[in-house]
Amino acid sequence: MATREFIPSIPQRFAGIFLTDAGYACENPPQNGGRRVGRLEYPTQHVFPNIPMSYADLHLHSNHSDGSDAPACVVQRAVAAGMVAMALTDHDTLSGVPEARAEALLQGITLLSGVEISARFERREVHVMGLGIREDCPPLLDRLAALQLARRDRVVRMVDQLRTAGIPLDADRIRARTAGIAPGRMHVAVELRDQGTTRSTQEGFDRFLNFGCPGYVPKEMMSVEEAIDLVHAADGLAFVGHPGLSKSLRQMLPKLLTLPFDGLEAYHISHSPGRTDEFLQTARGRGLLISGGSDCHGTAKTTPEMGKVRMPSTHFEAIQAALHATS
Ligand SMILES: [Zn+2]
Ligand SMILES: [Zn+2]
């Protein structure tokens, strides 16, 4: 009952959310009564400590790009981490979405189709997150297919360069490992680790695959403007991916936001709570949608990050509302 005493002081922005006697915040009227207190814009914990919340993770990778787990397993992990909604956002491919959708139906979690497109802006790499995209959009599919070919070619060149540098790699094993999926540096890093050249995939990046290293090959990228256009052509929403990942990206954000992005990724494993707040303010100040997630790659990069980033699902609901409004 104590929770109800807070209700008169709740700001108007919370209209649309009900509180049960148990203090549980929900969008529909609870069966045992409860009071309408508003549309929730901020994490409930900021106002009501100890009230259970629901969460979404809208940035997840499977083994259709550089994650370690099959899409169905990613869905199961998201459910186990307590998410009510998720998006599969593999790099430059939608191929994992059908399997994820089938499992999401079984598991009772809401799934958004997604993609993380590597794009170029002022000679820097920016990741454009496309959420809620149609999977049958020819312009997007054709462009992603071309990127897959470029990715394959890039891996071949990495292997060639490393061989020249005295690090022979089994190209057939990498080819088998990446059959039908989006190949990338991670797969070369995994091979380097598995054959004992390095102790971890991170060491593979640091010693052999990053800019300036013997196996480095630049990635073919489309412009950020083209990535946004493709996402919009597929009826999706475009977000600036992890704007706090590096200082240069953060400094670029005001310029990026002059482009027709629909929102930005405020929640991310690389963002401190202070940084997340900063991006939430930026998004609200500009009337942009808010997204976010763990960027979990299973065990491919580090330990699984799923569950460490808990974006309140109210942001996901705003995204869904925007998708419905544009469809
Ligand atoms: Zn990224
Ligand atoms: Zn990612």
Image (spheres, helix red, strand yellow):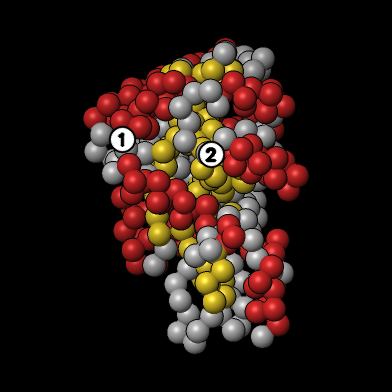
Query: Local crowd at mark 2 within 10 Å, few (<14), some, or many (≥20)?
Result: few
Tag 1, which secondary structure? loop
* Residue at which label 2 appears: 287
Quadrant for the N terminus, please: bottom right
Quadrant for the C terminus, please: top left
Question: Which amino acid lies under the numbered mark 1 shown in the image of this protein?
Answer: Ala
In x, y percent, where is residue 271?
A: 69, 42
Tag 2, which secondary structure? loop
Q: Is residue 141 left or right of residue 4?
A: left
Q: Residue at x 44, y 48 (%)?
A: 319
In x, y percent, where is residue 7?
A: 65, 73
Q: Is residue 145 left or right of residue 2?
A: left
Query: Local crowd at mark 1 within 10 Å, few (<14), some, or many (≥20)?
Result: many
Q: Residue at x 52, y 72 (%)?
A: 36
Q: Is residue 161 visible?
A: yes
Question: Which amino acid lies under the numbered mark 2 shown in the image of this protein?
Answer: Gly
In x, y percent, where is residue 228?
A: 42, 27
> Does the closest atom of ligand 1 sit within 8 Å of the Cβ of label 2?
no
* Residue at which label 1 appears: 234
Name the residue nearer the viewer: 22 or 53: 22
Q: What is the C-alpha distance between the residues marked 1 and 2?
A: 22 Å
Label placed on residue 82: none
On screen, residue 187 above or below 68: above
The quadrant holding residue 2 is bottom right
On screen, residue 182 above or below 211: below
The quadrant holding residue 136 is top left
> Which is closer to the viewer, label 1 or label 2?
2
The quadrant holding residue 48 is bottom right
